[in-house]
Amino acid sequence: MFDDAEQRVAKLALEDGTVFTGQAFGAEGTTFGEVVFNTSMTGYQEILTDPSYCGQIVTMTYPEIGNYGVNEEDFESASPHLSGFIVRNPSPIASNFRSSGTLDQFLVKHNIIGISAIDTRKLVRCIRDQGAMRGVISSEELDDSTLVEMARNSESLVGTDLVQRVLPDQPMDWCEKLSGWWDMKGPVDRTARSGPDTHLVALDFGMKRNIARHLYNLGCRVTILPGTATAEEVMANKPNGIFLSNGPGDPEPLTYAIKTIRDLLGQAPIFGICLGHQLFAQACGASTFKLKFGHRGGNQPVLNEANGRIEITSQNHGFAVSDENLPPELIVTHRNLNDNTIAGLRHTQYPAFSVQYHPEASAGPHDSQYLFQEFMAMVDAQPV
């Protein structure tokens, strides 16, 4: 841990009245969010910069975090979007030749408030028993009863449109390929797939950069539009395929996106990931619900119903598609083996499918990368 002279007291309070006292790290101040946990052992940079964590305070279950520092090449967006960060033991040093600084320095730079030196195992058990809860981290206000009341009065993720907080400002053409570190044999040969005349349009609800890199590495021209784009604006780009990105929070308030996707069905092949999966399902008439504590980590087992294989996947979501009253035109293609929730869907009438997990996962696993190839095959199969 840090030297005694650097130690600052901080507290975490949950809406159920539980309070943890620990040490502050990162920025000073007070922050609110839904307290969740992630079971990944590595990849904290990707977690910190994933826009899907907007409005959440993330607890890392692995106790030692930060030892390889931070570097911009591994970021999933330009800056962090999460509300706060909780770890047991943050490393005060960064030992990696790619590192440009320590975790603590990164949090300070981006004004992210953290707390360490608390019993994260107890916190995770609390979340598993009670469900994800609103919470507050503060290095300023240290009165327990005041903090608990602040947590109870804070914003709920349910019914809140968090996508508006992470949308890109304007459309853009994406031209960045996968890092050479992704495949130790070297970057993917873009000429191996469809040529640049194949145009993919991605609706960005808070998209991770590695998704855009995967789409570009398919050999296509890639245009990214804000998730508020209408079907007419999407089709004005004459896409050969349409991608629906990940993003934060509750899909139900995103009526504009649901309408757009409904209007796009049948006009071009569609592939959705995470929030994009939930929005695709709602556009087809399905419903979603809030999970007790969500699925967040790089070790989530998923069953591929088509071939019986198990994929180890990266996941980050607090909502899921309901099995109740699932429209007949949607068939379940994948199941989460931890709780049997729907992890993948395919449309029976249109070339469209989606998954609840992240096949582009960085820092891994890579079991589900084939889904990008399936999307490309679906695009290639359409008449010119």
Image (cartoon, rainbow, N blue to C red):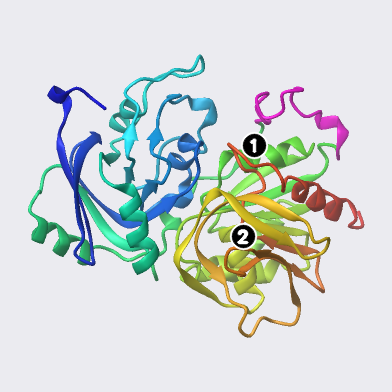
Query: Which residue range is magenta in the image?
Result: 176-194
Residue at (41%, 46%) from the top-left corner? 61
Q: How many marks?
A: 2
Q: Residue furthest top?
A: 97
Q: Quadrant of the N terminus?
A: top left
Q: Quadrant of the C terminus?
A: bottom right
What's the distance in space between the residues labelled 2 and 1, CA to CA?
24 Å
- Secondary structure, mark 1, is strand
Q: Is residue 44 above or below residue 202?
A: above
Q: Earlier in the sequence, mark 2 or mark 1?
A: 1
Q: Is residue 201 above or below residue 127?
A: above
Rendered location of residue 127, percent (x, y): 36, 61
Q: Magenta segment: does it hold 147? A: no
Decide which of 143, 32 is in the foreground and name it: 143
Asked whether residue 131 appears in the rendered view, the answer is no
Residue at (25%, 44%) from the top-left corner? 118
> Contact (CB < 8 A) between labels 2 and 1?
no
Asked whether residue 266 appears in the rendered view, the answer is yes
Decide which of 198, 352 is in the foreground and name it: 352
- Look at discs 2 and 1 and give the one toward the viewer: 2
Q: Amino acid at mark 2?
A: Gln
Residue 274: numbered disc: none
Q: Amino acid at mark 1?
A: Trp
Mark 1, residue position: 174
Left or right side of 321 for 266:
right
Q: Is residue 130 above or below residue 223?
A: below
Residue 356: numbered disc: 2
Q: Magenta segment: does it hold 185? A: yes
Q: Residue furthest left?
A: 143
Rendered location of residue 199, percent (x, y): 77, 45
Left or right side of 356 for 158:
left
- Secondary structure, mark 2, is loop
